[in-house]
Amino acid sequence: METATEAATTDGVTIVAGQPCMRDAKGRWTPLELIKPQHKLEDETVRKIMGHARALSAQVGRFRGHTATDLGEFDAILDQEYGGRPRGAVKGNRTYQTIDGLMKVQVQVADLIDFGPELQIAKELIDECLNEWAVDAMPEIRAVVTRAFNTDRPGQINRADVFMLLRLDSQDARWKRAQDAIRDAMRVVGSKEYLRFYERDRPDARWRAVTIDLAKA
């Protein structure tokens, strides 16, 4: 039975029975000499990029932690300044800004919303309305309803379009009951905090974001 005499290093090469090998996607050991040069080069390239990605991810994680600590300490000082008692983490949206007005840090808190079984009742009521209105129903309303409940993929809900249904007005009592059902279906299941960073060259200039999101960099 072949055994690896040494664990695979960062280059993915392991000595098996005295021969350098690499493990393939099926878990099999392949002698290094049998691996095509372009595949080995691709492997090396990906490993190099992933090494930088892991380091950057760890750095961003540390930065976020330091930022939360710094803002938390500042909030605690404000609590003491105004005679407040320790409140733990400050909740809600807030903005911190430099004296010269050229840099700011924004903390935005978004509720995580899910929907309960009342949403299915709302859909049935809305379907009744649309089926009865038939000819008179505006195509755009039908489009919003279709997107909201994503009829092509059962169980999938488009939250933005569900909220849009609450803004559509109708005197039909069923429509109003459907809107009430949507509101009753809403469940706040948590919250997520987002950090935003901005700077500008002069106080009357537009803010520009300091991008940390790799997809937007």
Image: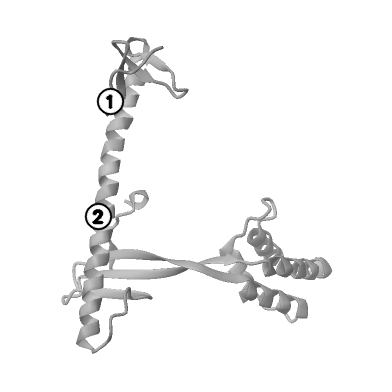
Q: 151 and 83: which one is in front? A: 83
Quadrant in which the N terminus is drawn: top left
Displayed quadrant of residue 195: bottom left
Q: 158 and 24: which one is in front? A: 24
212 w.r.t. 47: above or below: below
**Location of residue 23 in the rendering, given as x and y in whole percent from the top left corner:** 39, 21
Is disc 1 placed on a helix, strand or loop? loop
What's under tag 1, amino acid-wise?
Asp
Q: Residue visible at 33% across and 49% down? A: 214
Where residue 11 is drawn, which disc sits there? Answer: 1
Where residue 26 is drawn, which disc sits there? Answer: none
Q: Answer yes or no: do the residues labelled 1 and 2 have beta carbons within 8 Å?
A: no
- Which circle's residue, 1 or 2, is located before the other in the chain? 1
**Farthest residue toward the left?**
100
The residue at which mark 2 appears reads as 62
Using the rendered image of the protein, determine whether residue 144 is visible from the camera's viewpoint. yes
